[in-house]
Image (cartoon, rainbow, N blue to C red):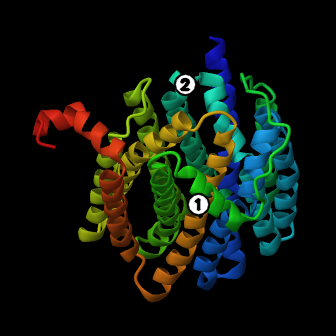
Amino acid sequence: MAKRKNWFSLFFTNYLGVLNDNFLKTLACFICIAWVGKENESMVVTLASAALVIPYLLFSPLAGRLAKIYKKRKIVVWAKFAEMLIMLVAAAGFLVHSTSLVLGSILLMGLQSALFSPSKYGLIRDIGGEEGISFGSGAMEMFAFVGILTGTLMAAFLSESAGIPVLCAILFGVALFGWLSSLTIRANESEPLKESHETLNPLKFVKDMFSRAKAFKGLNLIVVGLATFWFIGSMIQMVLIVYCRSDLGMSDSETGIVMSLAAIGIGAGCYLAGVLSRHDVELGLVPCGGITTGLMLLAIFIFDAGGVFFAVLVFFAAFFSGMFKVPLDAWIQANVKGRELGDMLAYSNLITFLFMLFASGCFGAINMFFDSRIVFIFLAVLTFAITFILFVRVVEVRERFRKLRIVKFFYGSKV
């Protein structure tokens, strides 16, 4: 019972933080677009997405150091307290109709998220032990994507019906509850290091961590696999805002529903991957998730899907991408021991958000020269490519895939 309570405190704290991130970002996309005009729609979406990403590129080394020299729970508590102050900045931006101030608050939220991300994910093993890594990783991601769902839906519906003061009160209220929830987290942490000498220079940090990651066979490729997942997810989120409204003629509310289906799909896929893995790390799910995700994205492009068919394909693409992601997360947690995990999670975050920043640039470039529908075929090819690379280059992915019951049923020992 106590362990369940400890799990819930961590999951709920993360859920509320993700909710506020996405509520604020989606509100900015919908409301600020009305201030600056439809012709600047893609620019606002790109800037809002990039604002959450840039701090990870600059401050991930510092985040890794914090997770090593301080109690991770304490870092989470202070980060959640800072969120309340950031929401006051966002509220000021909305109240005075300042796009720059709203985007600045999103940048601050990105900084807050970057600084405590290795700590919150590092707490998974501290709470659940080695046997709880797969479940904890899957459930953590499920709650995170339910947070994306909630924040996106709230923004889509409330941006049309609620006044600015009400929206500001919600932003601050969610941050307040997130801080109170963080105070209830209990974890069995190892003692922090007295000091850490890792560089805070992002470029040198990546170079050093790339070399250190070579000691864990396959780790660098798994980090790239996770980064590619977030590249794809980031581009899907951006393209849905533009494609649903401009190409499919959907309202803000209908667009919010489709984006929410994507979040539900990823959350469900993450949770199922955690359950299917049981007490193990099931990398065999990675090819299954990757191939099926690619097929769903390919179908959207080939059939020029719209309406309910489009929404269904988006849901299943998201669902199978969740099954692709969780085993990669769990593998890092299971194979990197002690306080070194903080550095490796920070390294993974930095690479991930470098990819997400690149995704913002790719989305802007594709939208400038091509129809936004091209994004789906581009992402399908990318999904197939990273799945193939992981299958060929990471031995454990290939071996675990061959041992899956469904693979044995269809192919016997031939795979």
Name the side, left or right, on which 271 lies relative to 66. Answer: left
Q: Amino acid at mark 2?
A: Glu
Count how many numbered circles sit on residues in the image.
2
Question: Within 10 angstroms of label 1, few (less than 14), some, or many (20 or more) residues?
Answer: many
Residue closest to the far top: 1
Identify the element where label 2 is drawn.
helix
- Name which residue lies at 65% across and 24% down: 127
Quarter of the rendering occupied by the N terminus:
top right
Whether residue 128 is situated above or below residue 172 in the rendered picture? above
* Residue under pointer 1: 351
Dividing the picture into quadrants, the one containing residue 106 is: bottom right
- Name which residue lies at 41% across and 51% down: 318
* Residue under pointer 2: 130
Question: Within 10 angstroms of label 2, few (less than 14), some, or many (20 or more) residues?
Answer: some
Q: Amino acid at mark 1?
A: Ile
117 or 175: nearer the viewer: 117
In the rendered image, residue 414, in percent from the top left (x then y), is placed at 11, 42
Residue 406 in sight here:
yes
Name the side, left or right, on which 228 lies relative to 310. Answer: right
Name the side, left or right, on which 373 lies relative to 78. Answer: left
Dividing the picture into quadrants, the one containing residue 62 is: bottom right
In the rendered image, residue 70, in percent from the top left (x then y), is placed at 83, 37
User: Which numbered tag is attached to residue 404?
Assistant: none
Of label 2 and label 1, which has the lower sequence position?
Answer: 2
